[in-house]
């Protein structure tokens, strides 16, 4: 007696489209901030939720500068509270510019400053 075995093969094809997060990542805005001796020239910022690259200019400070962004209310002196993607990828030499990685900002308040310059803490509001 012969046995017959039937095998049913179903092939499924999926088309994946970019999700909202992928679309959001494709829209990145550069925020340019300038530092002079002891201060940022932009004292406050208001932005929409989204993705940003921070471009930091060192306008004749006389030494290297950086950039730190922290959610408001967190201890800015503790590096674990810093938004690491907002750090410039290289310290900013005198009379040059450097940029951060892409940083996603949600609604809320943040503070930004430079501990190397050093500057006061300034407010960044995301609506």
Image (cartoon, grey):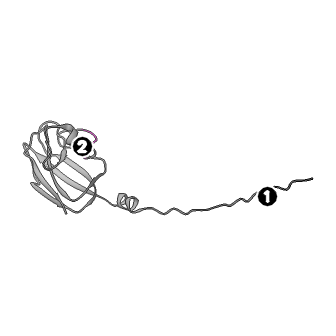
| Horizontal and vertical percent position of residue 7 | 76, 57
Asked whether 72 or 53 is in front, the reply is: 72
Q: Tell me if 68 is positioned left or right of 120 in this view.
A: right
| Residue 71 located within the stretch drawn in magenta | no
The residue under the point 55% across, 63% down is 15
Q: How many marks?
A: 2
Camera-near label (2 vs 1) is: 1
- Number of residues whose C-alpha sits closer than 10 Å to that of mark 2, classed few (under 14), some (14–19) or many (20 or more): many
The residue under the point 85% across, 56% down is 4
What secondary structure is found at the residue carrying circle 2?
Answer: loop
Q: Quadrant of the C terminus?
A: bottom left
Cα distance between the residues tagged 2 and 1 = 61 Å
| Horizontal and vertical percent position of residue 87 | 24, 43
Q: Which mark, residue 87? A: 2
Q: Residue at label 1?
A: 6
Q: Give the magenta range.
A: 86-90
Q: Residue most toward the front?
A: 1
């Amino acid at each position: 007696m012969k046995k017959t075995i039937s095998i049913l093969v179903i092939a499924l094809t999926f088309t994946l489209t970019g999700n909202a997060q992928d679309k959001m990542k494709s829209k990145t805005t550069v925020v340019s901030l300038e530092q002079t001796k002891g201060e940022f020239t932009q004292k406050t910022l208001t932005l929409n939720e989204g993705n940003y690259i921070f471009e930091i200019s060192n306008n004749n400070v006389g030494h290297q500068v950086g950039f730190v962004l922290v959610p408001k209310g967190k201890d800015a002196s503790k590096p674990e509270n810093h938004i690491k993607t907002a750090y410039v990828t290289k310290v900013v030499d005198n009379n040059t510019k450097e940029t951060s990685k892409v940083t996603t900002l949600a609604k809320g308040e943040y503070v930004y400053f430079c501990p190397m310059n050093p500057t006061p803490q300034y407010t960044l509001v995301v609506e």
